[in-house]
Image: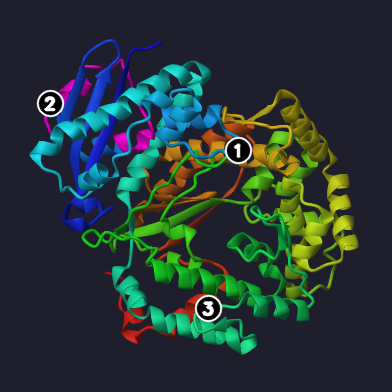
Amino acid sequence: MPPTIVLDTEWGYRDGRRDCETAWEPVVLCARVAGGDAHHFWGGDLRLRAFLDAHPDHTFVAHSATAEIKYLLRLGIPVPAKWFDTMVAFRVTHNQPGRLNASLVTALNSTGLSHLVPLDKDELRERIVELKFTDADRPRIRDYCFEDVAGTAALHARLAGRVDPTAMTVWMEYAKAVARMELRGLPIDTRLLKAILANRGHIAAALIADLNRTCPVYDGETFKKKRFLAWAAREGIRWPVKPSRTTGRLYHPLDDDTLEEMENRHPLIADVRQTRKTIKSLQKHGIKVDGRSGRHHSSTMPFRSITGRNQPRMFLFAGPKWTRRLAVPPSPDHALVYVDFVSQEIGVAAALSSDTAMRAMYGEDVGHDPHLEFARMSGAIVTGMTELEVKEVRKIYKTVNLAVLYNQTAGGIAQRLGISEEDAARILALHKDQFHVYHLWSERVVAAAYHRKHAVTPCGWRADVPFDSKWRTWSNFPIQGGSADVMRLVTIALDRQGVQVLAIVHDGWLMSCRKDQIEQLRAAVEHARRWACEKVLGGFPLRVDFAVFAERFEEDDDKVRRTWEKIAASLPGEVLCVPAE
């Protein structure tokens, strides 16, 4: 095993400005060299850089290493080359449905190392974060930090031999890229944000009044579930039911995932979803912005889902989609560029299954639409159809195209689209007939996962497969996991080329560059895309859309535009006319 140095860090924020990058202050970095001495460095101790430089061949070990990497980057210290993240190692060796928590305490308790769980010191931790400790507290803070070092070192000894070192190297390159991106932050139109927050009561009232004109589903700012379900029943919309996790009784869920699944049934459902998300976001002030820099910083939370995808926290792009309009270029001579994969999951499924018909459906030409192509292959697009009719047909075939990737039934598709179960079953049968290679491959992959008791992606992300887990989870795992592999490699390649990535958004990236460097950025994206597809998909060419925004990000979505127009009508006119600060 290569020589290691285990690290843990503590830091805080000045003036009560928690999580604001311009208020960040280093407190202490604690390190223990395997088989050697322990070291600690307070604040901006200049000896820290010399210590790291003196160990170029060591692997640096940390739990959630992105935090330690950011600590060094903030101090202007070059990040060591070799890392091992015990959080990632624990996730990949203990990954299964319902077991996603990977805190150091959870990892130690789950690996027979409970005796190393640090004592709970919430009061001390708060004083550290708020920088309200005294010199007399320093020994306690140092000891607290070294307790985490000891736990991380033991966890590393327990897990290192179970993780593919090549895969860990790739994952740590991704962690470095994420750390740099998170510190970069996302420029925000703070003037517009302040106006929205100052008028949030008027905005909420306007959105609610508009909804209530169609159906009085709100009483004040309280959403009335019974009224909404009664309206759905009158409209002939059969709402999904599922058993309660606590009582087992059936109920009608109205969470955001369910509303998203059902919003194609009626415009009101989409408006209800946007309104509820907007009011929740405004009430919780869910858009965290550093007032000094005007930048939004969030936690990407990589590797936190069962498929290895990110699970971002306090993230602008995780809220209602209209809030993305707050994203602006960092300066007048820069533009925002949004790059996202075209139907990524369909392309990954076609590539991994080697289904030539599905690969042809995905296509290689710019502007080719795999969902419309599926509809054409099925005879659903005929001469003389209006644009609206084609749009409705595409919606149906897109839903089926995606639903098969997680083994949704005809009943579920029918409920989601508002079509008969017979029609849904017919389109599903067409899909299975035209793309039979994919369906046979998917069945073999899932059966093999149950037999081996684990599933794995092309780049080594692994999950345990309990015998009583859902088939649907594992039919979708190779698609989402393979997509996550591609996303990580593209991000690494962009970072190595010096691209200013501002955010990773599921299957895309928001970036910025000078307006006179758009074509250089396009070339960098193309290089990253090709490299990632070669490594993960054997060269199958996933396509990307490349959109440039000179002034602010704008979502190409009619539902989002409707919501934004209502919000804008509640704001002072001068706010919308003046360029972003």
Q: Do the residues under discs 2 and 1 have CB atoms within 8 angstroms?
A: no
For the N terminus, which image quadrant? top left
Q: CA distance from mark 3 to mark 1?
A: 39 Å
Q: Quadrant of residue 467?
A: top right
**Which secondary structure lies at badge 1?**
helix
* Above or below, 147 relative to 402: above
Task: Looking at the picture, tell me which residue is in the foreground, 157 or 476.
Answer: 157
Q: Amino acid at mark 3?
A: Thr
For the C terminus, which image quadrant? bottom left
Task: Report the residue marked by disc 3.
Answer: 222
Q: Amino acid at mark 2?
A: Arg
Left or right: 357 as drawn, with respect to 130: right
The mark found on residue 481 in the picture is 1
* Residue density around tag 3, few if under 14, some if 14–19, many if 20 or more, within 10 Å: few
Residue 8 in the image: state x and y as whole percent. Answer: 29, 31
Q: CA distance from mark 2 to mark 3?
A: 57 Å
Task: Report the residue marked by disc 2.
Answer: 47
Q: Which residues are magenta?
A: 45-68
Give the mark, 2 or 1, whose residue is nearer the N terminus.
2
The mark found on residue 298 in the picture is none
Give the mark, 3 or 1, whose residue is nearer the N terminus.
3
* Residue density around tag 2, few if under 14, some if 14–19, many if 20 or more, within 10 Å: few
Comparing labels 2 and 3, the label whose residue is closer to the camera:
3
Residue 253 in the image: state x and y as whole percent. Answer: 66, 64
Residue 185 in the image: state x and y as whole percent. Answer: 33, 52
Q: Amino acid at mark 1?
A: Gly
